[in-house]
Image: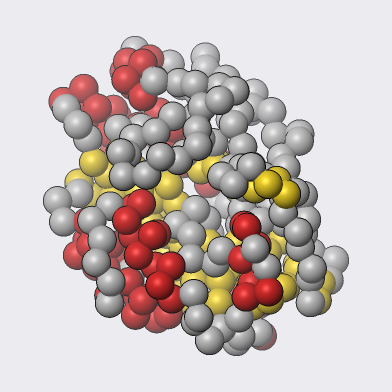
Amino acid sequence: MINSIIFSKDRAMQLDLLLQSIYKNAPETFNINVLYKFSDEEFERGYNILKEKYQNVNFISENDFKSQTLNLLNQNYEYSCFFTDDDIIYNSFNETDIIKTMGENPEIFCFSLRLGKNVKVCYSMKSENVLIPESENDNIIIWNWTKHYMDFGYPLSVDGHIFKTKDILKLSTNIAYKNPNTFEAALQIFDTFPKQKMAAYKTSVLVNTPVNIVQSVFENRKAELFSYSVKDLNQLFLTGKRISLEEMDFTNIVGCHQELELKIN
């Protein structure tokens, strides 16, 4: 199994969608840890519902983000992956492909679940992505990230990137951060890391849905086509409403970040 850490704040309903997608499309692939934070008792109630539903998931209430993140980077697992709670695994995959690819190619820094040949648009920069693979087979592409820009030149993401645990633990130990956004930002000082390759499936298996925001550190692009208040979603969640993974439309994923309509029933 691959060790995974999901970062979540005030978004139990969207976290439920991510967990639905993991259990449907990547069953028995991840050891799942959720490091969560809530603004008030109403948001806490949402997480309590999830704790009852997903009893095999390790839920940890955040009180010291850096130390807890480092503790969750469990060296008993050779590989570790980060997610944020607005990610969705929309295509099924087999961890064997990932472990085999990274094991046979020690120059690979990370395996991205959010990238693929279909990822033509860089949402955050409002620009086109360009990919020049160095090698590919029926299922996997490999490229030199130091020779790319935009999403394909950005290995140190906390959105569905899989690393060797020993590599990412070493980097994460030697920087200062206090939440997921400052964590990812701080990691960028290692843009000369000697492992210069990235890998991904030919078609991405994960998409991030920026339909709201729970941080005030950066002015990230979000909610231009679809906008959902985290407070409103939480209230719906507490009344028994859920986002239906089966009713979501993933037919035209062209970015690793892409606004999607949430199908609530």
Residue drawn where x is 22% and y is 35% of the image: 38
| 233 over 10 or under it: above or below | above
Give the residue drawn at x 32%, y 56%.
182
Q: Position of residue 136 (x, y in %)?
A: 81, 72
Residue at (62, 75) in percent of width and height: 146
The image quarter in which residue 202 lies = bottom right
Q: Nearer the viewer, residue 131 or 127?
A: 127
Colour scheme employed for the rendering of this structure: secondary structure
The vertical placement of 138 against 55, above or below, is: below
Q: Give the left or right position of residue 8, taking residue 261 as reference.
A: left
Q: Position of residue 40 (x, y in %)?
A: 16, 27
User: Looking at the rendering, which quadrant does residue 48 occupy?
Assistant: top left
Q: Does residue 142 show up?
A: yes
Q: Is residue 138 above or below residue 245?
A: below
Residue 16 visible at all: no
Q: Nearer the viewer, residue 66 or 265?
A: 66
Exactly how many numbered labels are in the figure? 0
Where residue 21 appears, as percent x and y from the top left, is 55, 41
Is 76 located above or below residue 217 in the figure? below
Report the residue at 45% width, 57% height from top. 158
